[in-house]
Image (spheres, helix red, strand yellow):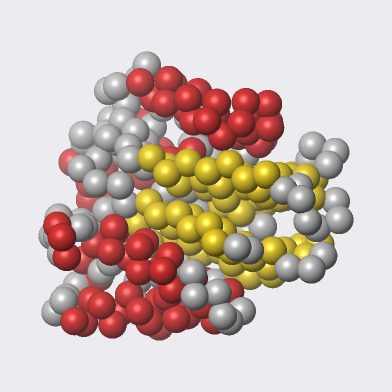
Amino acid sequence: MGMKVEHILEQGSGAQNEDYLIMDNNIFGVFDGATSLTGACFEEGKSGGCMASSIAGQVFLRNHHPLVRLGAEANDSIRARMERSQIDLSRRCGLWSTSAAVVRLGDGEIEWFQTGDSQVVFVDRDGGYKVAARREDHDYPTLSMIRERGRSHPEVQRLVETIRQGMNRDYGVLNGEREAERFFRTGTEPTCNIKTVLLFTDGLDVPCPAPKKYKDFSCLVSMASELGLEGLRDHVRRQEAADPDIERYPRFKKHDDIAAIAIHF
């Protein structure tokens, strides 16, 4: 199958790039590590988010089982590494965690896996698109509060901590908890009408003044098609740079990390 692949892996305004990206033969994936609320660092000074996203990515690179099984193995590997690092697993806000969006190209179909807020989007030859696992944005309540009260309001940080406690209760992440598997989403998509597969972490989301419970990716899809991933990235960064104090576009930091892949057939 002839194809062209674009990709971006870029640090945002945080201290580390907690996103991770894999591309090898027929498997592609992006992972968005969540910034640990404890602020602790581990091997080579890496944050818990860095640890989780890289561990998960390396497990998927083994590419030897169905993606849903690799998801379970990635989750188990994160738990094992936390245990070796003597992480208190009862302190849930300190767990290493990451979202994941992975595809594997097969004969006439694409196998996909998704958990958390990383996305798999299939763009068809007519310009329409399909989100592989459409889900409510678990950050919607926090972003709505940031819009109303500002990023630095003390109640925002309290809500961030409350939402984090919803991991694998209200939304899924890979963080070593057995409950993570309940939130795995997986499936296959025939390739016959697919023009492009987009994989991306939420750092590539086009800034929006009004948060939505269900994200609308129409603008992102059309701009990725017209401008390419780098052109889309440049647009996102310009919009964010024009709002340095996070007053127009509610978000958690000036620039988020980005991991993104576009597979064009």
* 62 lies above or below 131: below
Residue placed at 78% from the left, 56% from the top? 1
Of residues 196 and 185, the one drawn nearer to the viewer in this rendering? 196
* 114 lies above or below 195: below
Point out residue 35 in the picture as x, y percentages from the top left corner: 27, 53
Q: Is residue 158 left or right of residue 170?
A: left
Residue placed at 25% from the left, 77% from the top? 81
Where residue 59 sits, quadrant-wise, is: bottom left
Q: How many marks?
A: 0
- For the question of whether residue 210 can be seen, the reply is no
* 214 lies above or below 161: above
Residue placed at 35% from the left, 21% from the top? 241
Where residue 66 sits, quadrant-wise, is: bottom right
Residue placed at 20% from the left, 58% from the top? 46
Point out residue 204 in the picture as x, y percentages from the top left corner: 49, 38
* 35 lies above or below 150: below
Point out residue 7 in the picture as x, y percentages from the top left corner: 53, 43
- Which residue extends farthest top? 242
Q: Is residue 55 left or right of residue 89?
A: right
Point out residue 86 in the picture as x, y percentages from the top left corner: 14, 79
Where residue 97 sits, quadrant-wise, is: bottom left
- For the question of whether residue 123 can be seen, the reply is yes
